[in-house]
């Protein structure tokens, strides 16, 4: 029996099956923006009104990316004192629950290599990181590096390593790619890797880096991104002003060679774009990218899916300025790339770009990122300007925010991401024998302050879900769903129905007595926000899965 008239109204609304409609592209996309200013020890979730709705606090600054994983866990690269201190230096990776509980604290900083910039979550739960292998000048010379280009106490190329967490402070390396396995040089015929650079666009010229660091850093990779469709990795190297694509489907042994994987090319470059001079297919006049940041594949299901977005920091003028470019990746339906001998990889120009109406107004010479949102808008972080904003496909600005955090010190931000994720759980497994409890946090933002919320559950999965007021609640109607709908605030849930506070937040919990025969069941939970005046569901959350183990 329904407990209150309001629940009765909400129940009736939930069973009105309407056609789904997306957020209009002329308005800001919904969601919460995640960011961590470079010199701030806090990571923030911010709503579209610029209000901070959640904060994770740390002892140190980031190193320097942050992401939300699918289950709502914060994945944060951390900065520690280590053997390498170039810009973007990090040193390790942290996984942190919504309540601040540290779930993983893994250090990647030693005499052989040091993490920097990126810690990217993968769909399989592993993490990709960028590392600087630490080589001596003698080792670089032995590989064919021109001694005139050795300008530091060591030589620091790039590697990408995939780690699988094994404990609270441990991990196992499960995959590795190292650029030094894929170089060519035309400087010294007595050394390995000697060849004609223009004949090997799949390899990296060991002596091409006109903008290299005076400390011995060669490439300064600042972003990696993953394409789950083709199992490929995007790699950004601003010292070469290029974006690269490599095959992730290889084994580590294959990634060190030129055969194997879906591409059949091992770890060789499959695609590169931005500066044909770097592989002997052009001159300086053909350069397209200028110290770019934030390269990423547009996610599946979003407009332009599979294309590449990049923040092109130093587009020549006059005046010098920044732009965001969308590139159509030159891949066939199987993820293969073709290139005629001596030619440069396409496209000739971006398929979409954004420059400020007054170009100099958008001008970040370092940092920065761009992300295609589900409604087709693009969110841009002009990092050096501490300026976040969102534009439509036509270039109309529909949202902006100027960062004011931390209270003292620079406000610059390396990267932002927006997530339509509003439900967070502090646990995802419970023992059916022992029982226990799970805390849920609902975080919607100030637009939903004072609205009603109702936390619902299902043990029958999340798809196809229930469509209500054009929004899809990711739960399947079953007996548990009906119980949570018609008997709110009753076991196993408490505080499952109530009013969102001034920040659009609320908390609830799930309690499981021990000894119940429910092992093997997965209970999914999600909530709706409801405007009782309009009589309308205004928001549906993501689902959180809870596995009931023996």
Image (cartoon, grey):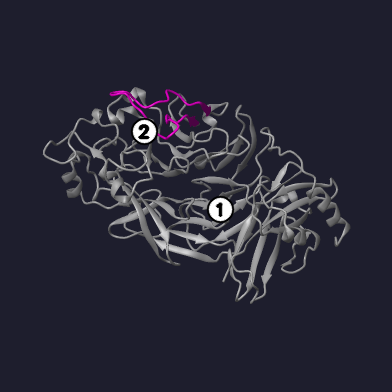
Please give the name of the residue rendered at 28% of the width and 24% of the height, measured from the top-left corner.
341
Q: Horizontal and vertical percent for residue 110? A: 31, 60
Q: Residues within 10 Å of mark 2 (few under 14, many from 20)?
A: many
| Residue underneath mark 1 | 70
* Label at residue 523: none
Side (left or right) of 305 relative to 435:
left
Structural distance between the alpha carbons of marks 1 and 2 = 30 Å
Q: Horizontal and vertical percent for residue 411? A: 53, 48
* Label at residue 272: 2
Residue 400, picture quadrant: top right
Please give the name of the residue rendered at 50% of the width and 65% of the height, measured from the top-left corner.
103
Image quarter in which the C terminus is found: bottom right
Most frequent secondary structure within the magenta stretch = loop
Q: Nearer the viewer, residue 448 or 272?
A: 272
Q: Horizontal and vertical percent for residue 290? A: 40, 32
The first of marks 1 and 2 along the sequence is 1
Residue 520, picture quadrant: bottom right
Q: Residues within 10 Å of mark 1 (few under 14, many from 20)?
A: some
Q: Secondary structure at mark 1?
A: loop
Q: Is residue 166 magenta?
A: no
Please give the name of the residue rendered at 39% of the width and 33% of the height, measured from the top-left corner.
336
């Amino acid at each position: 029996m329904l407990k209150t008239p309001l629940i009765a109204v909400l129940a009736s609304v939930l069973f009105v099956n309407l056609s789904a409609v997306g957020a209009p592209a002329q308005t800001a996309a919904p969601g919460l923006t995640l960011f961590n200013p470079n010199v701030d020890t806090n990571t923030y979730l911010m709503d579209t009104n610029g209000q901070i709705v959640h904060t994770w606090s740390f002892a140190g600054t980031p190193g320097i990316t942050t992401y939300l994983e699918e289950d709502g866990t914060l994945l944060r690269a951390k900065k520690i004192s280590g053997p390498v201190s170039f810009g973007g230096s990090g040193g390790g990776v942290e996984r942190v629950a919504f309540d601040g509980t540290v779930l993983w604290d893994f250090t990647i900083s030693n005499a052989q290599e040091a993490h920097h910039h990126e810690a990217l979550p993968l769909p399989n739960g592993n993490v990709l990181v960028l590392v600087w292998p630490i080589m001596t000048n003698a080792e670089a010379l032995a590989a064919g590096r021109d001694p005139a280009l050795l300008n530091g106490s060591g030589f620091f190329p790039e590697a990408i390593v995939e780690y699988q967490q094994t404990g609270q402070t441990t991990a196992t390396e499960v995959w590795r790619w190292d650029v030094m396995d894929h170089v060519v040089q035309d400087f010294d015929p007595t050394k390995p890797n000697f060849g004609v650079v223009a004949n090997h666009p799949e390899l990296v010229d060991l002596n091409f880096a006109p903008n290299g660091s005076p400390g011995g850093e060669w490439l300064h990779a600042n972003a990696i991104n993953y394409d789950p469709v083709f199992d490929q990795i995007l790699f950004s190297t601003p010292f070469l002003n290029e974006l690269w694509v490599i095959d992730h489907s290889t084994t580590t042994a294959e990634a060190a060679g030129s055969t194997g994987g879906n591409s059949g090319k091992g770890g060789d470059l499959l695609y590169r774009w931005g500066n044909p001079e770097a592989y002997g297919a052009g001159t300086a006049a053909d350069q397209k990218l200028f110290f770019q940041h934030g390269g990423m594949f547009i996610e599946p299901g979003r407009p332009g899916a599979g294309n590449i977005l990049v923040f092109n920091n130093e587009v020549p003028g006059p005046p010098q300025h920044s732009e965001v470019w969308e590139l159509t990746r030159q891949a066939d339906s199987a993820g293969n790339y073709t290139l005629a001998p001596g030619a440069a990889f396409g496209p000739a120009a971006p398929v979409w770009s954004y420059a400020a109406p007054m170009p100099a107004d958008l001008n970040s010479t370092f940092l920065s990122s761009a992300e295609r949102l589900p409604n087709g808008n693009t969110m841009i972080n002009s990092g050096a300007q501490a300026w976040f904003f969102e534009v439509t496909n036509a270039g109309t600005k529909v949202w902006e925010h100027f960062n004011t955090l931390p209270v003292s010190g620079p406000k610059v931000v390396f990267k932002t991401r927006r997530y339509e994720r509003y439900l967070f759980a502090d646990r995802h497994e419970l023992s059916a024998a022992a029982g226990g409890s799970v805390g849920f946090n609902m975080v919607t933002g100030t637009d939903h302050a004072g609205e009603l919320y109702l936390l619902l559950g299902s043990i029958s999965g999340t798809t196809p879900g229930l469509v209500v007021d054009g929004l899809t609640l990711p739960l399947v109607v079953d007996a548990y769903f009906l119980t949570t709908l018609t008997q709110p605030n009753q076991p196993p849930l408490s505080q499952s129905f109530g009013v969102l506070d001034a920040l659009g937040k609320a908390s609830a919990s799930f309690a499981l007595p021990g000894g119940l025969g429910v092992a093997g069941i997965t209970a999914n939970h999600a909530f709706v926000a409801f405007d009782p005046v309009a009589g309308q569901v205004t928001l549906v959350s993501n689902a959180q899965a809870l596995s009931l183990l023996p």
